[in-house]
Amino acid sequence: MRLPANELAPSAARKFVRTALAECGPARPSGAATASPRAVITDQLADDAVLLVSELVTNAIMYAGTDVEVGCHLDSGPGPLAPSVAYAPGPSGVVVEVVDRNPSRAVRGGKDAWREGRGRGLQLVRALAESWGVIYRHSEKSVWFRLETAPAAPAPGGSTDTAAARDTADATAEDTRQRAPRTPGILPPSRPRPRRGRTAEWVDRSGPTFLAEAGELLAGQLDEDMVAAIAGQLLVPRLADWCGVWLTTESGAMRLSRVWHTDERCIGALRLALEHDPPPARLPTTGIPWPWPQNADAAGAGGAALLFPLVASGSCHGAVLLGRKGVSQMTDGLVRLAEDVARRVAHALATARHYTKQATISRALQRRQLPESLAEIPGFDTAIVYEPRGEGQTVGGDFYDLFPMGDVEDRRWCFLLGDVMGHDVEAMSVTGLARHLVRLLAREGHGVESLLARLNLALAEEGAEAVAVGGEQAGPRFLSLLYGELEPDPVLGGARCTIASAGHPLPLLLSADGEVEPAADPQLLLGISESAEFHANSFRLAPGETLLCVTDGVTERRRGNRQLDDADGLAEVLRGCVGMGAKAVAERVRQAAHDFDTSPVDDDLAVMVIEATPERMPGAGPGAEPESARPRPRAQAGPRAVGPAT
């Protein structure tokens, strides 16, 4: 069967092999004198074959990167169908072969494979297969394995006794291994060892490696349902034929999170059966025998099921139920290994839940640091782009706001864009303090200069108190802030803008004809000196003009030794935004910051755009003409009339 090199190939290979084994017909190998007798394909053999072909196809797709061919057949010799291999008559076996088109890619499966991080799939093949090997040809490479079957033993009534067939297979395993092929180009099979049953041998030999792999996969998972999903994939089919994973809820009930089964067709029916009979939230011990659920296996043969509580740090986080069909009880080694896995799953769940709790608290606090919505100014188009630096955060050191100064009749609006020094939780706390204090001072009637002076005094005093209590390592918190007021003109449109920049990147004003110039003077950071004085600049924001405000996450975006705003780089970006709306301008600036370098943005990024729309303001007289349609007085041409507020 030919399979394309995509993520669906392993699933298709598993289905193909299971279907081929279900047919279980006799096969005559090329060059053999006689055909193999009909053999018994046990459920364990089919599960092993499906598991191993999935590993080999996955490896071929990942490392060879070519289409693969999968073959499966019965034979009476210990190797794949190949003209160079001579077969001796003996017990029959199932041979599965995976062929890729990249013979130059060597197969790694030696004893150092685990440390190298590759070849782990072949370690599994080595543990489960009776023999295996690799054939290199001019244009392809074949990895094969052989699983020994048991000859059909007639039972009374003409039926086949599966248990007797398994015993026969173990009895003849040693003799069959001695006939493994030794031909040029084929890696030698693993050294034959006495068998005590596939599962028991695998637990003893590969159990520690399996636990290490389980720990790696579970480590760092911060979603409890993802932990449950990984647990199911680890346990089935290596330790069980099926499993169900329950998680405790806040109310103390059990919620069935994941169900896995070697036969995917049985998952739906098994889930219904397990949901109908959940385990209690508190279990007295581990490895508790559990009634075999209905529809757990298609044949209805029954089996053994054990329930393991997921307990970590004194709390029960759920339970995992394992089932193995066709056995009356599970071996002690398997139970101990399952207990070790359950402990690792429980600790992973405890970690994930602790992270979720902390993240929920953090998000609740962060939501209070920024406004839930921005006010709409009649006659203006506004836009905000905000991207905090920290992964999973909604708030960082940058903050913004846009709000009316008083009631509707006041017709004045305030806007601000600030940046607290640092990116930690302390910076976030200063963010909320500064934003709410600015709102309070503005609505008490303080103008731009007075507001900055009082905010500076508050930050300086708080910094001095922090140093007095926590020592020099506490350090003061400095703040850069761009704060302004808009007083819309209901007759001519636009607004009178009064603005001040305290240690912040200067705002840029884009005129309707494409001129760009700073709209404020640079001044000292807030919080440095209690006696610092601040002044504001005042200008007219005419219809069709745009005011751009950004934080240093934009202007100081680096590419090597160069910053985005070197040689007026930000002004050049804004100059290309003539005729755009506020949202389009904000997105253009954000994209320019990201595109300036291929590395991720390493600072909080905030962009605020305020555009006076060309349409007439509400309340304007019927004969009023927008200012953008009238000639600008000569005194405002060239350098803008941006000066100290009077």
Image (tube, rainbow, N blue to C red):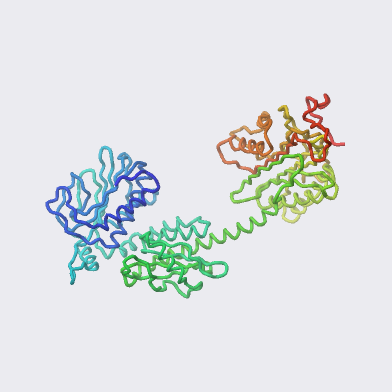
The part of the image, by quadrant, that contains residue 140 is top left
Q: Residue at x 68, y 43 (%)?
A: 384
Across and down, in percent, residue 26 comes to 19, 56
Q: Position of residue 108 (x, y in %)?
A: 33, 47
Q: Residue furthest bottom?
A: 284
Q: Residue at x 14, y 48 (%)?
A: 31
Q: Residue 515 lies in what quarter of the image? A: top right
Q: Residue at x 61, y 37 (%)?
A: 591
In the image, is 499 to the left or to the right of 77?
right
Front one among 562 and 315: 315
Viewer-side residue, 284 vs 527: 284
Residue 46 position in % (x across, y down): 29, 59
- Name the residue furthest right: 646
**Residue 619 lies in what quarter of the image?**
top right
**Looking at the picture, does residue 250 appear above or below residue 580?**
below
Residue 589 vertical placement versus 33 (above, below):
above
Q: Is residue 450 left or right of residue 349?
A: right
Give the vertical position of 626 relative to 250 (above or below). Answer: above
- 21 or 177, which is in the foreground? 21
Q: Is residue 5 visible?
A: yes
| 182, above or below 643, in the image | below
Residue 517 location (% of width, % of height): 74, 30
